[in-house]
Image (cartoon, rainbow, N blue to C red):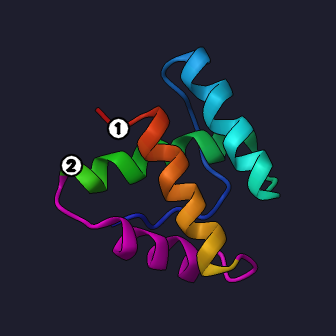
């Protein structure tokens, strides 16, 4: 499961990273760029392992209590649209 706060490490493709970060910024979230990118990749790994978007949004929110469930859902959606196959 996603256990990352909004502060972890690396990205794969610059274009995908830029689009993902732009979506995150539209939500109004800020944080360590590399951490946000790693979170996006972790979300996709967990989706591939069978976790649902709703489950992942709940985990993202629980690990980052300053954001709403709606914003956490937006983070999951941004990851899916930019990183998940």
Please give the name of the residue rendered at 41% of the width and 64% of the height, measured from the top-left corner: 2
Left or right: 78, with 44 as reference point: right
Is residue 71 shown to the viewer in this render? Answer: yes
Report the span colored magenta: 49-67
Residue 55 lies within the magenta run:
yes
In the structure shown, which secondary structural element does the residue marked by tag 2 occupy? helix
- Does the residue at mark 2 contact the one at mark 1 (Cβ under 8 Å)? yes
Residue 10 x %, y %: 56, 32
Residue drawn at 69 percent across, 38 percent down? 21
Count neighbours of disc 1 (C-alpha within 10 A) and say few if under 14, some if 14 to 19, many if 20 or more: some
Question: What's the residue at 54%, 46% (across, down)?
Answer: 78
Kindly identify which residue carries mark 2. 48
Q: Is residue 39 visible?
A: no
Q: Which residue is mark 1?
A: 84
Q: Assess disc 2: are there few (<14), some (14-19) or many (≥20) residues with their C-alpha within 10 Å of its C-alpha.
A: few
Counting from the top left corner in percent of width and height, residue 81 is at 45, 39
Q: Residue 15 lies in what quarter of the image?
A: top right
The secondary element bearing badge 1 is classed as loop
């Amino acid at each position: 499961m996603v256990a990352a706060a909004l502060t972890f490490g690396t990205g794969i493709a610059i274009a995908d990273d830029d689009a993902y970060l732009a979506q995150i910024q539209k939500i109004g979230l800020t944080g360590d760029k590399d951490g946000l990118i790693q979170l996006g990749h972790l979300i996709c790994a967990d989706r591939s392992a069978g976790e649902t978007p709703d489950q992942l949004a709940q985990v993202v929110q629980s690990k980052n209590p300053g954001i709403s469930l709606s914003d956490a859902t937006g983070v999951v959606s941004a990851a899916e649209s930019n990183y998940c196959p």
